[in-house]
Image (spheres, rainbow, N blue to C red):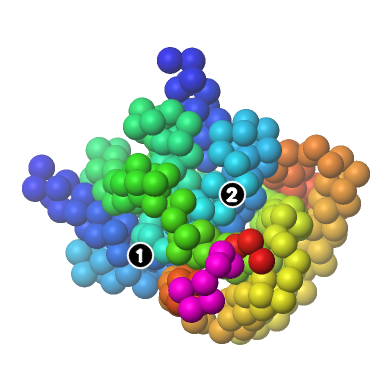
Amino acid sequence: MIELLKLFFVFFKIGLFTFGGGYAMIPMIRQEMLQNDYLTLDQITQFIGIAESTPGPFAVNMATFAGYHTHGIVGSLFATLGVVLPSFLIILLIAYFSDRFLKTKPARAVLYTLKPLIVGLILSAGLSVVLHGVLGDFMTEITFDYIALIIFSVVFLVSLFYKKMSPIHMVLLSSILGIIFYGL
Amino acid sequence: MKKYIDIFYTFFKIGLFTFGGGYAMIAVMQDLIVEHKKWIDEEEMHELISISEATPGPFAINGATFIGYKHGGFLGSLFATLGVVIPSLTVIILISIFLEQFSSNVIIQNALKGIGAGVGVLIIKAFIKMGKKVKKNWYNLFFFVLAFVVSFFTSFSVVYLILLTALFAVSYQAIKGGDISND
């Protein structure tokens, strides 16, 4: 039980102190996993690859994996609960107070200014994902994956013709195209 | 009860089909929640993204909690968060059990590679949709370009970028008076 509580608190800490989404969590996850002997460096590296290609948030995937690896299914539940709880509580508080708070003039000014900022961040994220798919890890070594470019283009064109196409259908279409083109 | 099942099921779908991190999640929520279910509006979506960037934790959890609360109070937030987490939890437990088979199955690996290539479309389309809703003026253009350049070409923390911009907006509003969001 003590071990499970410790697992819970390690991931609670990770959930509480990592801002800015998935990849920002990697250094802290790595440090905590190694210090507590939950995973080896090789396992972490292997699992970062798996967490990237499976659905759902990176932090949750990582917590489930480390929890399962050390204490089975109960471990994965404790670790996942730990990593989810901080965001859940913080957002609950903010959502509760936001209606009154966000109507004030300074808050409106902040939201107005953050709007274009967010649109810029989304464009940057989208381009990074596309470039990463086609050129691999282009910061270190460029590899050109023309199949990825074909799949991207096909999904993009199809989504232009079927304006109502939902993201879920785009994901399904991409996976089918992946099986066909990479399987050839 | 029906409402909570709907919330749970919708977020379960989102959790199951969202590959490729937080920004892909934004794209999926924009489509499913804002445009189809209309549980929150465009303004609230921007609020949610701003709040998420400036608070800890994954966007999926922040988004589920926020939207669940707006639509169904505390229980709504609970069902939404459970819904978005359970698919990852189940998938990862299965993968942990069948790790060898998972890594060596060619069809699964090819499907995942395909998703990796196609998921960018989601984010680019979310960018186009959300970009259309921003008022076109020099002030907004400046912050759009700033965010793109800083996050694409540097490793400067997005959290600080958001906080500094918020600080600027409050000061600018105080100095300039009036209402900058109505210019």
Q: Residue furthest top?
A: B1
Look at 72% across and 62% down and name the residue there: B135
* Dot 2 amino acid type: Glu
Element type at mark 2:
helix
Q: Quadrant of residue B159?
A: bottom left
Q: Name the residue under label 1.
A: A18
Image side of residue A144 versus residue B3, left or right = right
Label 2 CA crowd tier, 10 Å (few <14, some 14–19, many 20+): few
Name the disc covering residue B43, or none.
2
Q: In which quarter of the image is residue B94?
A: top left
Magenta segment includes A128: no
Look at 38% across and 31% down and name the residue there: B73
CB atoms of marks 1 and 2 within 8 Å: no
Chain containing mark 1: A
Q: What stretch is highlighted in magenta?
A: B174-180
Q: Tell me the distance, in whole angstroms, between the alpha carbons under discs 1 and 2.
A: 26 Å
* Image coordinates for residue B179, horizontal then vertical, percent: 56, 64
The front one of A73 and B134 is B134
Label 1 CA crowd tier, 10 Å (few <14, some 14–19, many 20+): many
Q: In this view, does A76 lie above or below A43?
A: above
